[in-house]
Amino acid sequence: MTDLAGYRRPPKGTQPEYLYPPYASTAKRAPTKPLVLLPHTLSEITGPLFGHDDVRPEDGDLTAQHDAVPFGERIIVSGHVTDENEHPVPNTLIEIWQCNAAGRYRHQNDNHDAPLDPNFTGTGRVLTDKDGRYRFVTIKPGAYPWRNHHNAWRPAHIHLSLFGRAFVTRLVTQMYFPGDPLLPFDPIFNSTANEKAHNRLIADFDWDTTVPEQALGYRFDIVLRGRNATPMDK
Amino acid sequence: MHLTATASQTVGPFFHIGLEHLFGGDLAPGVPAQEKVVFHGRVLDGDGKPVNDAVLEIWHADRHGKYAHPDDTQDKPVTPGFKGFGRVATDDRGEFRFTTVKPGGLPGPHGMPQAPHLLVAVFMRGLLIHLVTRIYFPDEPANADDPVLQLVPAARRATLIASKMADALQWNVILQGDKETVFFEY
């Protein structure tokens, strides 16, 4: 078998480092010994693929999973998933989780003194379409306190998990909202050295997907790693 | 001109609500138990304390060394129903467990064969970007010539090779310290 075209390595500063002292939990969890550069073999350029069997229609509307609608500001999040070579990533699974409008997760370890919403689980799943586009409906999550430093608050965010086509295209990220006053103070948001890289985590308010009388639209495009040129591309 | 991949962010402490729909530690459903391998281990932080909020994702080839993926063009039979993916969270004691079959050997870089191995991605609060490591099998002669193991300093290779226990293989994720697991820049 000839050598395979691997995936492009991230430009410096565009991904976070493991040890990032402003985010206190990295101190005891970041590796301390040098990482070993992994060649991209057949094991790395393949990865689990998911399909329509893994997603039900109600998984894409986090406001329609219970008897009544949840409290909060209904929003529509949509965007385009491409790779670094600007090719769409079709039929890829996106896993979504978030807290409710009051800033509380439906999770046994979240003891923030804010109410749970009986009509909001905060979990969703969608598949990108053949052009790499996705869309889901939810409510805008609230800010919540955490214990990273004195008076620490996380800006409103939605967790997104994507697989792409390969083990090395796996991405878990967080989407933030434009104009959030907490963004400059959040160590997780600010964890990439490259400022453009973290500003790309802020969704755009989008008139085109805002539905009159119904919901504000936010656009969040996601880029997964792309392969180096293969002989076929040359 | 090309784009740059979106920055990774931590899964945080509450990932269970978003990821549990794919929790599953049986990577070879339908295979008789006596033909399977059980893996168990713990995730430990820099203080040696168990990490009770980690999630591991496992990816590997089938018994013939064939991946359930269209980009694996090897002329090998496909195992019906085999996916080769698992996702397990650690429990209160920082322990995880999964069962599967031992994969076959695989082609590697520059025509060098790779020894049977599993890929593992590790996610948790405190990791802004996930860790990637590999698990190799004990008593496997092909380990000696594995092109990826050879990239690892000899003194640290043992962290990637599971240990044989009475009824299972043990493999731990040690995040820091003298016995720190080898993690890869992927």
Image (cartoon, rainbow, N blue to C red):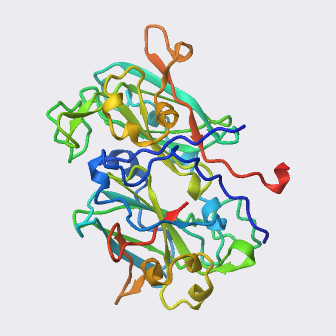
Q: Total of numbered circles in the picture?
A: 0
B64, A142: nearer the viewer: A142
Residue A123 percent across, percent down from the top left? 37, 39
Residue A188 percent across, percent down from the top left? 36, 41
Task: Reply above or below: A24 against A146.
Answer: below
Task: Reply above or below: A29 against A147.
Answer: below
Query: Which residue is at a point 18% across and 33% down the rendered structure image?
Result: A151
The answer to whether residue B138 shows anywhere in this view is yes
B60, B163: nearer the viewer: B163
The answer to whether residue B77 shows anywhere in this view is no
Task: Reply above or below: B101 against A184.
Answer: below
Query: Which residue is at a point 69% across and 51% down the rendered structure image?
Result: A227
Q: Quadrant of the N terminus of chain B?
A: top right
Q: What is the residue that sits farthest to the top in this orientation?
A: A213
Compared across the picture, whether B43 is left or right of A127 comes to: left
Q: Quadrant of the C terminus of chain B?
A: bottom right
Q: What is the residue that sits farthest to the left in this orientation?
A: A113
Task: Reply above or below: A195 against B115.
Answer: above
B88, B9: nearer the viewer: B9
Give the quarter of the image for residue A116.
top left
Query: Which residue is at a point 84% across and 53% down the rendered structure image?
Result: A232
Compared across the picture, whether A59 is left or right of A49 comes to: left
Give the quarter of the image for residue B67.
bottom right
B163, A225: nearer the viewer: A225
Residue A129 percent across, percent down from the top left? 63, 36
Residue B129 percent across, percent down from the top left? 44, 51
Compared across the picture, whether A16 is left or right of B145 comes to: left
